[in-house]
Amino acid sequence: MSISKKKATVLGAGIAMCAVVATVSVQAQSPGYTEATGGNILRTGSGDCVRTGSWNSGDATLVGCDGVVLDVEIEVIEGQPSGQVSLIAIPAAKLFGFDKAEVTEAGKEALEAWRRTVQNELSDAFAALIIGHTDSTGDADYNMGLSKRRARAVGDYLVATGTQADKLRIMGKGESEPLASNGTKEGQALNRRVEIIIIGEARALDTMLLPSVALFPRRSAELTAQGKALIEKNRDTALAVLSRATYIELVGHTDDVGDDDYNQNLSEQRAESMRDYLVETGGDPSIIFTRGAGEKMPIATNKTKEGRAENRRVEVLVLGRVKP
């Protein structure tokens, strides 16, 4: 989210394969302004921020001081492709027995052969998606469950052999994304697979920034009517991004008021609240993941109430489709 004296506009609605996630370095001190006891910016009786004798126009960067205002528009950040997303599809026949979700010895050999080629890439990755798929034989609900169990089995094997569990995102797509016709045995065999997508860096994801000042009451995780209206106002932009997503990660953030544990829990609850709303309005629950970052990733100062409001936000990280 940008800090500007003008309302920011949405930066385009098209999907890019990779994107740059903006990172703002928030300084421990506040150049140009006087801090009161407790670290907040000292204010005059009329509410103006008290400048130091060395203040100059370049110091006018703090939300809440000298006309710098909070941006409450949904912002989409897109960047140049970084080449940091890779994909491998492993046929289920190599991994599992018929209608089974336990990795076979032959399947372990196939995974080890793959891992040897991407070991360094995987260890340094931001995340790895494990996605199970089936053919259309059988009931759709059963196939969804089977695809998830197979993806989980592959994830469990990778963790047991040294991959960090918190890097893995387990997904099941059932029969919904065939690679070939299910009208032939050969086509069915192609559709029964597990895909592994390695996201090398967070900047390989498109980002939508949703300001919590409009979404949630202070210290709350319940979406407000104003927050829902903000999403509806930007529905076309959001749909352009979300409708082509392979993977969506919702990250909740807070300001630094309160202790670390409280803020961590609140950030998680805000991300989950956003997930529930997206699902209620038609989002695919199988591709939406949530996590909380607590107060650890501020994008503005926590020394003013306006800056703290900017830090109370939800970020939507989106991986566009790996294949057209």
Image: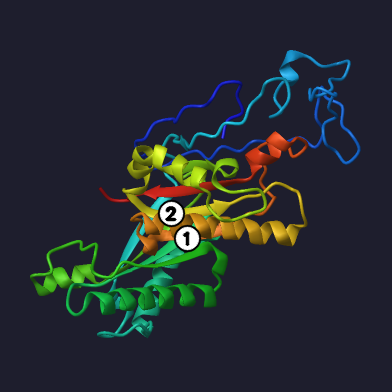
* Circles 2 and 1 in contact, beta carbons < 8 Å: yes
- Between 53 and 87, the one lying in front of the other is 53
Q: Position of residue 53 (x, y in %)?
A: 89, 15
Report the Cα–Cα distance between label 2 and label 1.
6 Å
Residue that lies at the very extreme toward the right in this rendered image: 37
The image quadrant that residue 115 belongs to is bottom left
Q: Is residue 101 left or right of residue 185?
A: right
Q: Position of residue 136 (x, y in %)?
A: 18, 73
Q: Which mark is residue 289?
A: 1
Reading the image, the residue beneath label 2 is 248
Give neighbour class at mark 2: few <14, some 14-19, many 20+ (Cα, 10 Å). Answer: many
Q: Is residue 22 above or below residue 95?
A: above
Q: Is residue 218 above or below residue 234?
A: below
* Mark 1: amino acid: Phe
Q: Is residue 97 left or right of residue 202?
A: left
Q: Which mark is residue 202?
A: none
